[in-house]
């Protein structure tokens, strides 16, 4: 049985607009699930709903089989780090982290030990007596993370917890979060804009678009087999081919069970060659280079073809020039059918 089950949830901040619509999400016990999607798609809204700060207009939230839809925030033993991560400015680092333990009336010496242990984990030993105003953004973020972990929560909710850290610390902290999460086996729902971060840290990733989850799968599956055009584009399949336009010369068109009528392909997976010699092969098209951009290791081309424009990456040292005629080959095994 899933630990978290959101069933047909609708959330609205006003009368007209539903931010989440018939939203469904299942998370198994111990699992680390990330929500990924463009700004405004409803990630924070989802986390706030799970935490108990947003009310569902319709639908049900089951936690460990119990109906939590109307359970107030303070009765949910959830740890969270929200966007903005406000600490109590008048409390020291120690007191900030100990706050949740105090609420739970944890025995004093036990509380002290747990606060010290967790501060060690987030690399803030020696900062106990500082106040939030005396910390850097990244240090504040780590206090917020420590505060969420110290209560030994039944569920962790993280909304961009690493957004104000520099690149190195970010990578270090995300491994740290993953390590702690595995060690404590605490179920986690995580939100980040950073795709690499989500993919590296999660058991499953949910790709959200306008208040619905378009795909929930392992990072590997999302990366290799996006189900929809939206998910495909989101994870770097910048090209979509419409079967109707591709016609019979595309062998992928005739392979069975393709009702989707669309294929996605990454810029790296299209083969480009000079001239038009190869254009008679199946799965190919001739075209004209419209834009050439130097990416450092390779070049990126925008190529205009009868099938539309394609973005193609290629490592040939001497770049194809603007206006040059080229042939694009779309290897069948690289074409991913999408809805
Ligand atoms: N308190 C509120 N009142 C009215 N509308 C809101 C409120 N909070 C969020 N919204 C709207 O709900 C939608 C979803 O917002 P949400 O904060 O969930 O997005 P998000 O996916 O977390 O985006 P981001 O990646 O930018 O943090 C947005 O269109 C936002 O403007
Ligand atoms: Mg947000």
Image (spheres, rainbow, N blue to C red):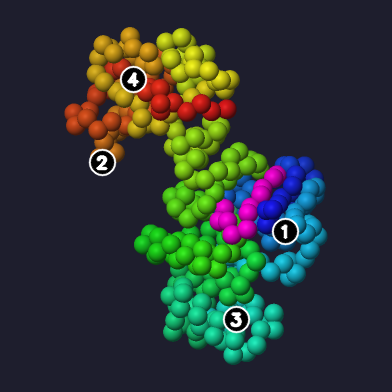
Q: Which mark is residue 296?
A: 2
Per the rendered image, the range of residues in magenta is 23-33
Mark with earlier residue (2, 1): 1
Give how far across and how far down residue 233 sits, in percent. Answer: 49, 34
Mark with earlier residue (4, 1): 1
Residue at the image point whose x is 46% and y is 37% from the top = 224
Mark with earlier residue (3, 4): 3
Name the secondary structure under disc 1: strand
Q: Could you tell me how far apart the alpha carbons at marks 3 and 4 are, in whole angstroms?
A: 61 Å
Tell me, yes or no, if residue 144 can be seen here. Answer: no
Main secondary-structure element of the magenta-colored stretch: strand
**Residue 257: which quarter of the image?**
top right
Mark with earlier residue (3, 1): 1
Q: Which mark is residue 98?
A: 3
Q: Could you tell me how far apart the alpha carbons at marks 3 and 1 are, in whole angstroms?
A: 26 Å
Name the secondary structure under disc 2: loop
Residue at the image point whose x is 60% and y is 81% from the top = 98
Q: Compared to 91, does 9 lie above or below?
A: above
């Amino acid at each position: 049985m899933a630990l978290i089950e959101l069933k047909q949830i609708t959330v609205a901040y006003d009368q007209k607009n539903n931010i989440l619509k018939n939203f469904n999400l299942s998370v198994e016990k111990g699992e680390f699930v990330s929500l990924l999607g463009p700004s405004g798609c409803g990630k924070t809204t989802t986390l706030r709903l799970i935490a108990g700060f947003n009310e569902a207009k319709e639908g049900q939230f089951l936690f460990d089989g119990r109906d939590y839809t109307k359970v107030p925030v303070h009765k949910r033993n959830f740890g969270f780090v929200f966007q903005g991560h406000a600490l109590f400015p008048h409390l020291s680092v120690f007191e900030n982290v100990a706050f949740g333990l105090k609420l739970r009336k944890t025995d004093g010496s036990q509380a002290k030990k747990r606060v010290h242990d967790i501060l060690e984990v987030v690399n803030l030993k020696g900062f106990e007596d500082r106040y939030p105003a005396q910390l850097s953004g990244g240090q504040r973020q780590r206090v917020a993370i420590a505060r969420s972990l110290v209560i030994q929560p039944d569920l962790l909710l993280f909304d961009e917890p690493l957004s104000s850290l520099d690149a190195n610390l970010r990578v270090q902290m995300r491994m740290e979060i993953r390590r702690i999460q595995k060690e404590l086996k605490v179920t986690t729902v995580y939100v980040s804009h950073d795709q690499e971060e989500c993919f590296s840290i999660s058991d499953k990733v949910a790709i959200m678009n306008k208040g619905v989850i378009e795909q929930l799968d392992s990072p590997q599956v999302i990366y290799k087999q996006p189900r929809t055009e939206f998910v495909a584009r989101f994870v770097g399949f910048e090209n979509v081919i419409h079967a109707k336009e591709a016609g019979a010369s595309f062998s992928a068109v005739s392979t069975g069970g393709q009702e989707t009528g669309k294929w996605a392909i990454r810029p790296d997976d299209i083969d480009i060659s000079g001239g038009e010699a190869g254009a008679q092969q199946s799965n190919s098209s001739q075209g004209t280079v419209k834009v050439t951009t130097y990416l450092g290791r390779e070049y990126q081309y925008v190529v205009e073809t009868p099938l539309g424009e394609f973005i193609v990456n290629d490592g040939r040292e001497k770049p194809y020039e603007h206006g040059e005629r080229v042939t694009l080959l779309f290897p069948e095994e690289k074409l991913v059918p999408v809805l």
